[in-house]
Amino acid sequence: MPLPAGGPMEATRFHAYGAHHIDELANRYGIPSDIRDAIRLTSMVLPFRVNEYVLSELVDWDRIPEDPIFQLVFPQPGMLPAEAEKRLAFLAAGPSSKAELRETVKDIRSRLNPHPSGQKQLNVPTQAGAELPGMQHKYRETVLYFPGQGQTCHAYCTYCFRWAQFIGDADLRFAAPGPELLVEYLKEHPQVTDVLVTGGDPMVMSTERLRRHIEPLLDIPTVRTIRIGTKSVAYWPQRFTTDQDADDVLRLFEKVVATGRNLAVMAHFTHARELSTDLARRAVSRIRSTGALVYCQAPLVAHVNDSAEAWRDLWRAEFAVGAVPYYMFVERDTGPYEYFRVPLARAAAIFREAYQQLPGLARTVRGPVMSATPGKVAVDGVEDTPEGSFFQLRLLQARDPALVGRPFRAHYSAGAAWVDELELAPETPADLRAALEGISPPEPEAGATVSEERL
């Protein structure tokens, strides 16, 4: 329901609700007891956080539990493996010790692939032989930077592939105490032109804190694009409209743009309803007024947006506010993956049908795309040949730049939902096959650094 200008939600101060508020929320919104109990159980393992704006303006409480926004922010029965749910329910209801329950939760989390696609093993850069905290460098041109004060969000998505950032385990968390090591690394790696400030969500920080992480990048002449990954426009648009320092953050954006750099706000919209309020549309307008670009991306996930109509409406809504539809991702193989997974064949069909209903200028979107270990693998379609049916695939981005843009094929599979479930066609070139099948590259020559070999 659109908000009137100056309405009560516009002036509301941010307030988050977590697992200890489940009974309060259930009573307030009439959440049935069985769903409430499932939310409580699942939130022992997966993070849960929501806020007043999402609760009041985005969830359709008359349609729960099927409502897509409810599915998007509230843990659901079936998100954990059945055996894990049984173990948790038994321990939570019985006389088990807190230590035993803690160990069980830790064990369940470890089985949910908390860091997919080699993030910990392959993406962490080094300097003088030491790993750099709060950074990832997977692609030659782009470094990901995780400021420590931005490792939470205004609300958590149940599908989030970075769920391990939010559970309080320091061993699983990417977090940088400050930008000093990043700046030194960028000086030594002039091939890096883009820095993605990510999280969590950097926009949970005050403008002054955000400024301390952004402004030092302006002293690095080789950095030409600064990206900010955020869900705030969808979950708390007041960050750009009525929060105490909303104007200050827009001035910071203007400062970045005034240096001749691109500032790209990578906005995560998963459903068109997130752009249905006046507040959200005004937030996008204010961001764009600074000269910043707004790019939109989200995964295709079951129970939330797994239809061509959902994506058509989302992309049209993004285009209508002047944002750029950018990526439809395939849900990563982590967390409640089995609950949200959509087979690649169906994902390709959904993408094609939605894409066909867009105006030409909105056909900027790419998808479906898997952010896999070797890089971003796009499913371009299905080809029927006398030898059988094949997925047409290519790497839009790659750990090895020589693989970017290279097409290849894999045998069609109706149920496959990730690249490692596919059988590559026999003619696949050796270098592509090695990257996609995880075959180790040759040992680095003497004197080469890990970063040089990885990038």
Image: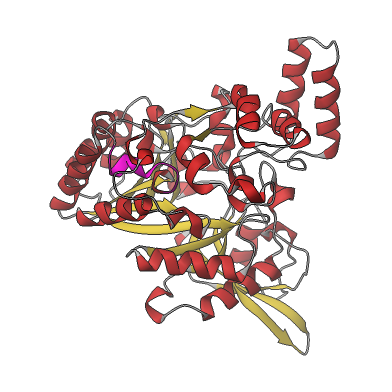
Q: Is residue 305 left or right of residue 246?
A: right
Q: Is residue 204 left or right of residue 38?
A: left
| Residue drawn at (55%, 39%) of the image | 162
In the rendered view, tell whether residue 378 sits above or below residue 173.
Answer: below
Percent position of residue 74, x then y: 63, 39
| Residue drawn at (78%, 69%) of the image | 414
The total number of labels drawn is: 0
In the rendered view, tell whether residue 307 sits above or below residue 278.
Answer: below
Q: Is residue 265 magenta?
A: no
Q: Is residue 147 left or right of residue 285?
A: right
In the rendered view, tell whether residue 391 sits above or below residue 249.
Answer: below
Front residue of 171 and 452 = 171
In the rendered view, tell whether residue 103 sits above or below residue 318.
Answer: above
Residue 191 visible in the snapshot: no
Percent position of residue 375, x then y: 53, 57
| Residue drawn at (31%, 45%) of the image | 189
Give, as a single range, the part of the protein colored magenta.
234-242
Percent position of residue 203, x then y: 36, 38
Percent position of residue 201, x then y: 42, 38
Judged by its main secondary structure, the magenta piece is helix
Q: Is residue 241 magenta?
A: yes
